[in-house]
Image (spheres, rainbow, N blue to C red):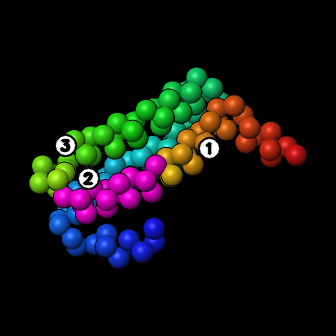
Amino acid sequence: MLSHLGELRGHGGFMETRHKTVIVVMVTLALIGAIVSFYWAQDSKSTRGWIAAAWTVLPPIWFWAEYTFLTKEDEKNDEKYRARLKFSQDCASKVWLAVGGIFSASYFDLLGKLAEH
C-alpha cells in the first residue's frame, strides 16, 4: 500500500487547488469544532451526545459529497484518480474512527474512569 504514496501527487489533476482548499477548510473547522466542543460540553452529556452523533453522521456525508460534487465526471472515469481518492478517503476514515472512539469514550465517561485508576 505504501508503494502508492509516490503516485498521489500530480497525476490527472488529483488534489487540485480547489479540492485542497475545501479539504483544508473542512479539516480545520472540524478540528477547531472538536476542540471547542470538548471544552464546552464537559458537564453536559446531552451536548456530548449531539457532538458524537454529528461526528458519526457528517464524515460519511462528506465522503459522498466529495465524490459526487467535487469530483469531475472525467475524473470519475479515471481508474488512477479513483484509486487515489479511495486511498485518501481510507486514510481519513481511520482518523474519523479514532476521533469517534474518543467521543464515544467521553460520552460514556470512560476517560474519567481510566484516569481514576
**Local secondary structure at mark 3:** helix
Q: Is residue 50 magenta?
A: no
- Label 2 Cα neighbours within 10 Å, binned few <14 / some 14-19 / many ≥20: few
Residue 98 against residue 37 in the figure, above or below: below
- Answer with the quarter of the image where residue 14 lies: bottom left
Residues at badges 1 and 2 in contact (C-beta under 8 Å)? Answer: no
Q: Quadrant of the N terminus?
A: bottom left
In the rendered image, which residue does mark 3 sit on? 69
In the rendered image, which residue does mark 1 sit on? 102
In the rendered image, which residue does mark 2 sit on? 22
> Relative to the observer, which residue lies in front, 1 or 16?
1
Residue type, numbered disc 3? Phe
- Label 3 Cα neighbours within 10 Å, binned few <14 / some 14-19 / many ≥20: few
- Looking at the image, which residue is at 51% across and 52% down? 94
**Local secondary structure at mark 2:** helix
Specify start and end residues of the magenta stretch as a single range: 78-93
Residue type, numbered disc 2? Val
Q: Is residue 80 visible?
A: yes
> Relative to the observer, which residue lies in front, 112 or 43?
112
Task: List x then y, in percent, for residue 29.
Answer: 38, 48
Mark toward the start of the polypeptide (1 vs 2)? 2
Q: Tell me the mark number nearer the camera, choosing from 3 and 2.
A: 3
Q: Tell me the mark number nearer the camera, choosing from 3 and 1.
A: 3
Residue 17 against residue 49 in the figure, above or below: below
Q: CA distance from mark 3 to mark 2?
A: 12 Å
Mark toward the start of the polypeptide (3 vs 1)? 3
- Looking at the image, which residue is at 45% across and 43% down? 33
Q: Is residue 15 visible?
A: no
